[in-house]
């Protein structure tokens, strides 16, 4: 009896789920892509998903493969390729457009800042309490206009319970300081893993803050420790690592 379960990337963040197929070649390509993903071999993921797409699966399956390949392309710092794949996914799943913050981040790195801030404005309609969305919207708006306009249009956020994100929002609003952001990340009695996550986000967004100010040396100071622990922090960890690659910041190896 043929094995009929195969792995396919669906929706966002390499969410590998099971679907039914009897195409053994497709099964093989997708299983190889999954193995490569587990090893963080992003080039391998692209290779095997490209092979899977060449087998011409149905439109829904192909869209999921494009989404997964888009994520892998981003992790390889191939930004325009990631956007092309995300576009292919959204062509089949247009209702997912407001949810697609990943494409917004890719727009920022591709220099498509108007498309970027519009993407984050749409994302705000489905994710209203996310400081990160407000910050990326600010960053795109800044590049498309100027600092005064970006700050004036900073999306208000009230309900993001992740430490130190509300302090990050206050920083971009001109109501806090980098020192307060880091102090908030380090404060309180929490587990080691939770504190490390807080510090990672503090470092990432302080790096982005100083870049927004045109202070590249200060930005690199915070970017390096964020990118050094990228593997521990999901897609946003990859954002930190890719940011370092694109800005040519040398990252120390994780101890």
Image (spheres, rainbow, N blue to C red):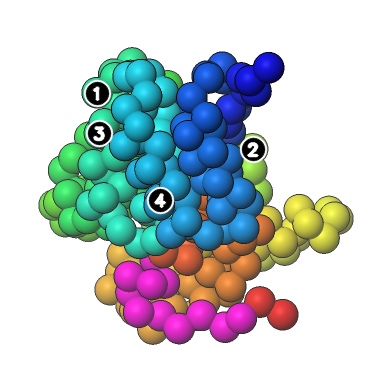
In contact (CB < 8 Å): disc 3 and disc 1:
yes
Left or right: 84 in relation to 251 = left
In contact (CB < 8 Å): disc 4 and disc 3:
no
Crowd around label 1: few <14 · some 14–19 · many ≥20 (10 Å):
few
Task: Count numbered badges in the picture.
Answer: 4
In contact (CB < 8 Å): disc 1 and disc 4:
no
Of marks 2 and 4, the one in the foreground: 4
Crowd around label 4: few <14 · some 14–19 · many ≥20 (10 Å):
many
Left or right: 94 in relation to 218 = left
Cα separation, mark 2 vs mark 4, equals: 35 Å
Which residue is more in the foreground, 73 or 47?
A: 47
User: Which residue appears at 56% of the width and 68% of the height?
Assistant: 226
Q: What stretch is highlighted in magenta?
A: 243-253
Cα separation, mark 3 vs mark 2, equals: 31 Å
| Residue annotated with mark 1 | 91
Determine if residue 227 is in view. Answer: yes
Image quadrant where one finds the C terminus: bottom right
| Residue annotated with mark 4 | 46
Of pointers 4 and 3, the one earlier in the residue sequence: 4
Of pointers 1 and 4, the one earlier in the residue sequence: 4
| Residue annotated with mark 3 | 87
């Amino acid at each position: 009896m043929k094995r009929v379960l195969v792995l396919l990337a669906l929706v966002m963040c390499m969410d590998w789920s099971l679907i039914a197929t009897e195409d053994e070649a497709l099964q093989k390509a997708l299983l190889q892509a999954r193995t490569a993903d587990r090893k963080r071999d992003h080039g391998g993921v692209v290779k095997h998903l490209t092979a899977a797409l060449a087998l011409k699966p149905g439109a829904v399956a192909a869209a999921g493969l494009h989404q997964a390949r888009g994520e892998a392309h981003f992790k390889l710092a191939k930004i325009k390729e990631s956007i092309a794949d995300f576009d292919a996914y959204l062509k089949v799943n247009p209702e997912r457009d407001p949810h697609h913050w990943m494409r917004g981040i890719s727009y920022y790195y591709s220099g498509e800042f108007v498309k970027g801030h519009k993407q984050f404005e749409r994302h705000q309609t489905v994710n209203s309490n996310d400081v990160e969305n407000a910050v990326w919207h600010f960053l795109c708006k800044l590049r498309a206009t100027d600092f005064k306009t970006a700050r004036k249009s900073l999306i208000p956020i009230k309900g993001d319970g992740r430490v130190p994100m509300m302090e990050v929002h206050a920083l971009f609003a001109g109501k806090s300081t980098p020192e307060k952001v880091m102090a908030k990340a380090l404060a309180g009695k929490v587990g080691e893993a939770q504190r490390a996550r807080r510090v990672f986000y503090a470092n990432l967004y302080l790096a982005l803050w100083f870049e927004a100010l045109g202070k590249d040396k200060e930005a690199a100071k915070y970017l390096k420790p964020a990118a050094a622990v990228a593997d521990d922090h999901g897609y946003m960890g990859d954002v930190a690592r890719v940011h370092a690659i694109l800005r040519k910041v040398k990252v120390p190896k994780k101890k």
